[in-house]
Amino acid sequence: MNKLEYYTPDDTPKEIQAYDASVKQLGVGKSGKVGILDVELQVNESGKTVVTKQFSQVPLQIQKALYTESFLPQMAFLYVISSSGGILQGDRYRTDILLKNKAISHITTQGATRIYSMNANSASQILNITVEENCYLEYIPDQIIPYKNSRYYQKVNLNVHDNSTLIYSEILTPGRVAMDESFEYDICYLRTHCKNQDNKIRFLENTKIEPKKQRVRDFGILGEYEIVGTVYILTKKEEIIALENLIEKELKKFEKITIGTSILSDESGVIIRILGNKTDMIFEGIFKIVEIVRKKTLDAPFSKIRKS
C-alpha cells in the first residue's frame, strides 16, 4: 500500500469523486494536507488505562491522557486536536484508535470539525476504531460544521468485540448559521461500517446530504429541524433491549428534541437519532445516553465533558 492509499478511503462515492479535480492550492498528499493519528490504549500494572502507542502527523495531534472522573480514576480522557482549525480542500485525514486489555476511555475533540469552503477537490476523513474484548469506549466528538460550497466524505470503520462496549456519536449541523450559511454546502457524505471480532457485519449505514440537490426540509428528511445527531451503542446482546427501553423513556422527557431508537440486526446494538435546532440540546441528549450506558455497563456516573 502506498502513502496515498493509506490515508485515502478506498470506496470514495462517485458523488464525491465528481469534485476531485485539480487542486488550486497545495496538492493532495503534500505536507500539511495529510493528518494522521494512531493511538493504542491498554491497562497498565496498576489498573489504569494508558496510551501505549502514539503516532501523529500534523495537523492531527492528541493531548496527554487525563484522569478526571473520581468514580472512574482508571478511565483515560483523550482530546483529539487539530492545529489547522478545520479541514480544507484536498485534505486527507486518518485516525486509528485501538483499545485492548480491558481499557476504558472517553475520547472527544478539542472543538467542532469545520469543513471550509472549497472551489476544487474535496476533503475526506477515515476513522478506524477497534475495541477488543472486555474494553469500553465513549467516542463523543464535537459537531461537524460544513461551510458554504464544502465537499466532505467521512468513512468510519468500527470493529467492536461482542463482549465490549462502544458509544459512538456524531452531530451534523446545517453550517455557519450565524453567517447566514444554512445548508449551502455541496455535499456531506457520512458512511459507517461496524463488524465484530469475527468480521461479522453488525451494521452498515450511509448518510448523504446534498442541500443544493435535495429538499432537506421535506418530511422524511429533516422536516422542521436543522441539526441531526446519531448515536450508536454496541454492547453485549443481553443488555440491548433494556438499554433501548430506558434511553427512549428518558429522552422523551426532553422537550426541544425529537428522538427515535432502533435495535440493530441480531440485537447487536442500538441506534438513536436525535433531531433538533440547537446543538447544545442535541448534546444534552447524547450526554444522557452516555450517562445511561455508563451506569449500566460500568456502574459509574458520568460528568459532562470539560472543554475549558
Image: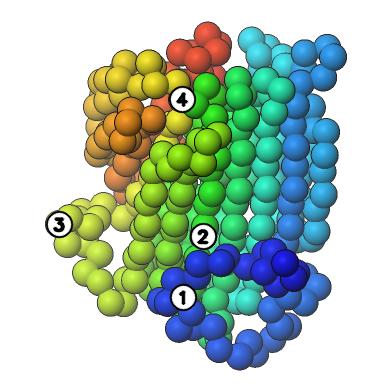
> Rounded to the nearest whole Å, what is the CA distance between mark 3 and mark 2?
25 Å
Numbered tag placed on residue 221 in the rendering: none
Instruction: Give neighbour class at mark 1: few <14, some 14-19, many 20+ (Cα, 10 Å).
Output: some
Identified by mark 1, the residue type is Ile
Q: Secondary structure at mark 3?
A: loop
Residue occupied by mark 2: 154
The spot of residue 159 in percent (x, y) is: 55, 40
Residue type at numbered disc 2: Gln
Q: Does the rendering let one see residue 249?
A: yes
**Residue at horizontal 66 percent and vertical 58 percent from the top:** 94
Residue drawn where x is 46% and y is 49% of the image:
193
* Residue 16: mark: 1
Rendered residue at 39%/49% (across/down): 204
- Could you tell me which quadrant the C terminus lies in? top right
Which tag, 1 or 3, sits closer to the chain's start?
1
Residue 49 lies in quadrant: top right
The kind of residue on which mark 4 rests is Thr
Camera-side mark, 2 or 4? 4
For label 1, the SS is helix
Residue extending farthest to the front is 198
- Helix, strand or loop at disc 4? loop
Question: Under tag 2, what secondary structure?
Answer: strand
